[in-house]
């Protein structure tokens, strides 16, 4: 977890390598600590490892359509474990039913691709750092 004055630790779970690399690089340029992940299964494993060994993750930026676990399934698993990690979804899917399911599972923000990068950065700045008692997500 980010200490006072430090920028947050953000995980970016995105299966498209170009999008993932671009977003990670931009976030690093903004001073964030970033952990990339290429799918939902790996993201959950990394979140657990980071929680146990490296202070955890402050935010999860998550794509919806990924192989294995979808972004919705990852969000639901986090909710089942009562995780305090804020989820921000980026997706090309503007289905209102999907958006409702994400919100019910605890997703805080949804950005439709192509999204306004400045708005995403502003959201990260405005969002409060979650409780330090985040739980592993198994």
Image (cartoon, helix red, strand yellow):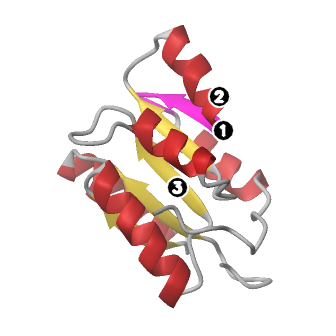
The Cα–Cα distance between marks 3 and 1, rounded to whole angstroms, is 12 Å
- Identified at 55% across, 68% down, the residue is 136
The answer to whether 86 appears left or right of 138 in the picture is right
Q: Position of residue 29 (x, y in %)?
A: 47, 70
The residue under the point 43% across, 37% down is 73
- Mark 1 and 2 residues: CB-CB less than 8 Å, in contact? yes
Camera-side residue of 66 and 105: 105
> Of 87 and 118, which appears nearest the observer?
87
Label 3: element kind: strand
Relative to 9, say whether 84 is above or below.
above
Residue under pointer 1: 106
Label 2 neighbour load within 10 Å: few <14, some 14-19, many 20+:
some
- One can see residue 62 in this view: yes
Residue 6: horizontal and vertical position, in percent?
Answer: 69, 82
Q: Quadrant of residue 28?
A: bottom left
Q: Between marks 1 and 2, how big is the CA–CA gap? A: 5 Å
Which label's residue is closer to the chain start, 2 or 3? 3
Residue at the spot of label 3: 60
Residue under pointer 2 = 103
The first of marks 3 and 1 along the sequence is 3
Q: What quarter of the picture does the N terminus occupy?
A: bottom right
């Amino acid at each position: 977890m980010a200490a006072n004055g430090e920028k947050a630790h953000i995980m970016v779970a995105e299966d498209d390598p170009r999008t993932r690399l671009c977003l990670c690089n931009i976030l690093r340029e903004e001073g964030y600590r970033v952990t990339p992940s290429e799918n939902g299964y790996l993201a959950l494993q990394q979140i657990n490892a980071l929680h146990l060994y490296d202070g955890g993750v402050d935010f999860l930026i998550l794509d919806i359509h990924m192989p294995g676990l979808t972004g919705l399934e990852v969000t639901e698993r986090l909710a089942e474990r009562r995780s305090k990690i804020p989820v921000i979804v980026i997706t090309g899917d503007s289905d209102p039913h999907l958006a409702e399911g994400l919100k019910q599972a605890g997703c805080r923000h949804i950005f439709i691709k192509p999204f306004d990068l400045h708005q995403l950065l502003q959201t990260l700045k405005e969002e409060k750092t979650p409780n330090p008692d985040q739980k592993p997500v198994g």
